[in-house]
């Protein structure tokens, strides 16, 4: 097939002949498939041709759009365990108020993302017409192909400007009456939009039901699929009474509310948060019928319609609990690339040697995969089929545990396998107990069963409550290095002492203990760490501040991966300590379908966006302030704070410095004589060069 641009907005794709139309005028050129251009005679005195200037299109402007958690009449949308996002989109459409968005970062092919029935006659000429785009400034492959009546239609490269594309085709002589129009994945898909879908014979009616996606079914209120947004998705998808809608956004960090008015019409509308800069906000809306809805949202300045994931950052979850439904989407929205979750042995092996996977695990782990979120599988605990419940206790149980770990690796998309949880801390019901010498054979069984089949899958050992120095020294002395690809622990010393900066010494000590006890080291993964926001914890704003300081120092001192604990509050009780480590509230608010992000979720997304995969490079701390540098040269990002109170800190720079604080506010500071002096305090800031 050959694609030629007909106008700025319309492309006609034909299988044999394509006609290039310029500005909608007469045919200027014709290309016939298989025909080679013939050589032309040369003039004896050809004047030297003037160079033709190269004109390139300016980058497409990416509009502000977002998706709604709603169904579309007449269409079957892929389950979210298969495709990350296949949802109605609002904010900028080719036709009407609604289009369809497909976002499938997992790079899975040959999956039908969306399908609609069509009835086609045999041996009949039809034209398939669609409007399509990709939310990108430059033209890219869409990762999508279209099919109908047994034929495949290939889309051209697309950018953020809607293109109308036409595919003339003829049905086969034996064409069945019942057929479908399908949107099929060809690989990874990011921000693909489709609208105004039509299949019609010449002069006939559109055979695709609801081809403009206007008819949707959704509850009333705020129906965003996620309330973590970027500057390219900062709008509310709403289903409200027709008429004017009043809204306000009040920063959690204080200040006057930002207000606005929009209009609602039809079952689904876009309410742009115009004038709302980066930050965490409480948004309140009131529609023409008097419905009032309030929720919290986070807005991040990012390169794209979503926060880019960073493989260093993970989060703990409990997908066996109802509050964690949609963990893959919730984690990816913040920028987490990985999730740590129990995979209970007793839940999945109820008959010896037979694995029947708990459907909560299957559903949520597959949804994680669909969002390109990897799983750190925590293989826990014992199994009463083999004796003890809290840990495997004899050789038969240990080998069965290793076999179960291998079955987990066979079944799920893993970034690592972690051997038990807080073995040093839990009351043990085996004869051996919780000594490190009792743990080594268990880890060895996992390695023996798993590593032959999956040599690149890390076996993560330790997983201790706190950094238990005596336990780890004993583990290394007992041969722990041989069974370890990454060492893990949960350095809650920082939480217990309300001092986020303690983690630096903890990590340094852990590496020193490895070297001294075993003569070598393994990478450290912090697989559980957090600060709760219950009555005896930290404030909602302090949670984010503590998080950024703790994570920055962890990475600066050699931690390879850091898993925050945890993703969602476990209960709605604000006084329950174990329940309030989450970054999202426990349940959606009234007339809102998505979980509200806490300020900590904004802080985490802000940090991930500010670092943008930059590796730690140097420590510029002094006696009064902490400064950790990530990246190099003009691409440096400093994370800086002064734990004991405000101090002045001077930085050498010939260019202006941009300082972003934990509220999201960014300010530029001009250098004087090659220096910029800033005031630092306990709340960290991100410092970058203002030079593009």
Image (cartoon, rainbow, N blue to C red):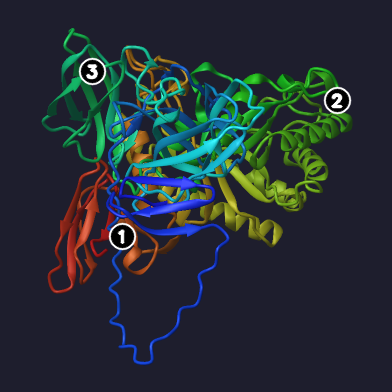
Mark 1 and mark 2 in contact? Answer it, CB < 8 Å: no
Neighbourhood count class around disc 3 (C-alpha, 10 Å): few under 14, some 14–19, many 20 upward = some
Residue 519 position by quadrant: bottom right
Q: Secondary structure at mark 2?
A: loop
| 3 and 1 marks in contact (CB < 8 Å) | no
Between 528 and 469, the one nearer to me in the picture: 528
Q: Is residue 182 left or right of residue 396?
A: left
Relative vertical location of residue 496 with respect to residue 337 in this rendering, above or below: above
Mark in front: 3 vs 1: 3
The image's mark for residue 623 is 1
SS at circle 1? loop
Q: CA distance from mark 1 to mark 2?
A: 59 Å
Q: From the top left corner, tell me how far across and down residue 521 is, in percent.
A: 64, 58
Furthest residue toward top: 289
What x and y, as percent, mark residue 286?
A: 18, 15
| Residue 160 seen in the current view | yes
Distance between the alpha carbons at the discs numbered 2 and 3: 58 Å
Give 419 or 474, whichever is nearer the viewer: 419
Q: CA distance from mark 3 to mark 1?
A: 59 Å
The numbered dot on residue 353 is 2
- Is 92 situated above or below 304? above
Name which residue lies at 38% across and 67% down.
632
Q: Residue at x 31, y 88 (%)?
A: 48
Secondary structure at badge 3 equals: loop
Q: Quadrant of residue 584?
A: top left
Which residue is the site of mark 3?
Answer: 265
Question: What is the quadrant of residue 399 in the picture?
Answer: top right
What residue lies at 64% left-to-right and 30% top-to-bottom? Answer: 173
């Amino acid at each position: 097939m050959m694609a030629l641009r007909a106008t700025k907005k319309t492309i006609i794709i034909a299988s044999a002949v394509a006609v290039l139309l310029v500005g909608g005028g007469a045919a200027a050129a014709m290309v016939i498939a298989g025909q080679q251009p013939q050589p032309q005679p040369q003039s004896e005195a050809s004047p030297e041709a003037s160079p033709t200037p190269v004109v390139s299109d300016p980058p497409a402007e990416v509009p502000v759009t977002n998706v709604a958690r709603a169904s579309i009449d007449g269409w079957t949308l892929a389950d979210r365990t298969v495709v990350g996002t296949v949802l109605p989109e609002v904010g900028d459409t080719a036709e009407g108020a609604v289009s369809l968005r497909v976002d499938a970062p997992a790079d899975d092919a040959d999956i039908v993302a969306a399908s609609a029935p069509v009835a086609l006659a045999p041996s009949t000429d039809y034209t398939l017409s669609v409007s399509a785009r990709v939310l990108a400034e430059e033209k890219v492959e869409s990762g999508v192909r279209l099919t109908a009546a047994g034929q495949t239609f290939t889309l051209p490269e697309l950018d953020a400007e809607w293109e109308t594309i036409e595919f003339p085709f003829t049905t086969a002589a034996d064409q069945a009456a019942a057929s479908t129009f399908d949107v099929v994945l060809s690989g990874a898909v990011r921000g693909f939009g489709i609208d105004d879908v039509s299949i019609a014979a010449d002069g006939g009616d559109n055979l695709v039901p609801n081809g403009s996606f206007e008819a949707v079914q959704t509850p009333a209120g705020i129906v965003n699929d996620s309330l973590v947004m970027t500057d390219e998705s900062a709008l509310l998808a709403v289903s409200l009474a027709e008429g004017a809608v009043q809204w306000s956004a009040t920063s959690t960090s204080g200040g006057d509310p930002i207000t606005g008015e929009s209009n609602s019409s039809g079952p689904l509308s876009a309410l742009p948060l115009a004038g709302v800069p980066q930050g965490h906000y409480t948004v309140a809306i009131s529609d023409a019928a008097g419905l009032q809805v309030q929720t919290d949202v986070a807005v991040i300045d990012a390169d794209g319609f979503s926060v880019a994931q960073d493989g260093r950052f993970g989060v703990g979850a409990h997908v066996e609990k109802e509050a964690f439904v949609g963990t893959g989407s919730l984690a990816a929205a913040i920028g987490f690339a990985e999730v740590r979750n129990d995979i209970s042995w007793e839940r999945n092996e109820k008959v010896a040697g037979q694995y029947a996977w708990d459907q909560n695990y299957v559903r949520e782990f597959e949804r994680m995969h669909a969002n390109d979120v990897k799983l750190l599988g925590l293989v826990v605990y014992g199994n009463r089929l083999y004796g003890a419940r809290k840990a495997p206790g004899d050789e038969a149980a240990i080998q069965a545990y290793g076999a179960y770990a291998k079955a987990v690796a066979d079944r799920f998309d893993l970034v690592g396998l972690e051997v038990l949880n807080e073995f040093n801390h839990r009351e043990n019901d085996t004869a051996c107990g919780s000594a490190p010498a009792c743990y080594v054979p268990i880890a060895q069984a996992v390695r023996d069963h798993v590593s032959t089949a999956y040599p690149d899958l890390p076996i993560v050992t330790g997983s201790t409550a706190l950094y238990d120095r005596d336990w780890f020294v004993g583990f290394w002395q007992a041969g722990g290095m041989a069974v370890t690809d990454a060492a893990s622990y949960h350095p809650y010393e920082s939480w217990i002492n309300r001092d986020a900066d303690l983690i630096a010494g903890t990590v340094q000590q852990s590496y020193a203990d490895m070297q001294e006890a075993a003569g070598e080291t393994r990478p450290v993964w912090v697989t559980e760490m957090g600060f709760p926001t219950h009555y005896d914890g930290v404030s909602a704003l302090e949670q984010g501040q503590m998080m950024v300081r703790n994570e920055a120092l962890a990475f600066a001192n050699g931690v390879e991966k850091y898993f925050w604990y945890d993703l969602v509050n476990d209960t709605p009780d604000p006084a329950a300590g174990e329940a309030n480590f989450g970054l999202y509230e426990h349940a959606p608010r009234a007339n809102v379908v998505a979980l509200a992000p806490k300020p900590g979720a904004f802080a985490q997304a802000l940090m991930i966006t500010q670092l943008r995969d930059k590796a730690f490079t140097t420590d510029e701390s002094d006696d009064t302030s902490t400064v950790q540098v990530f990246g190099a040269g003009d691409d440096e990002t400093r994370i800086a704070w002064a734990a004991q109170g405000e101090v002045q800190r001077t930085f050498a720079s010939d260019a202006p410095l941009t300082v972003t604080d934990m509220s999201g506010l960014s300010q530029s500071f001009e250098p004087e004589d090659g220096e910029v002096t800033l005031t630092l305090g306990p709340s960290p800031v991100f410092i970058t060069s203002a030079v593009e």
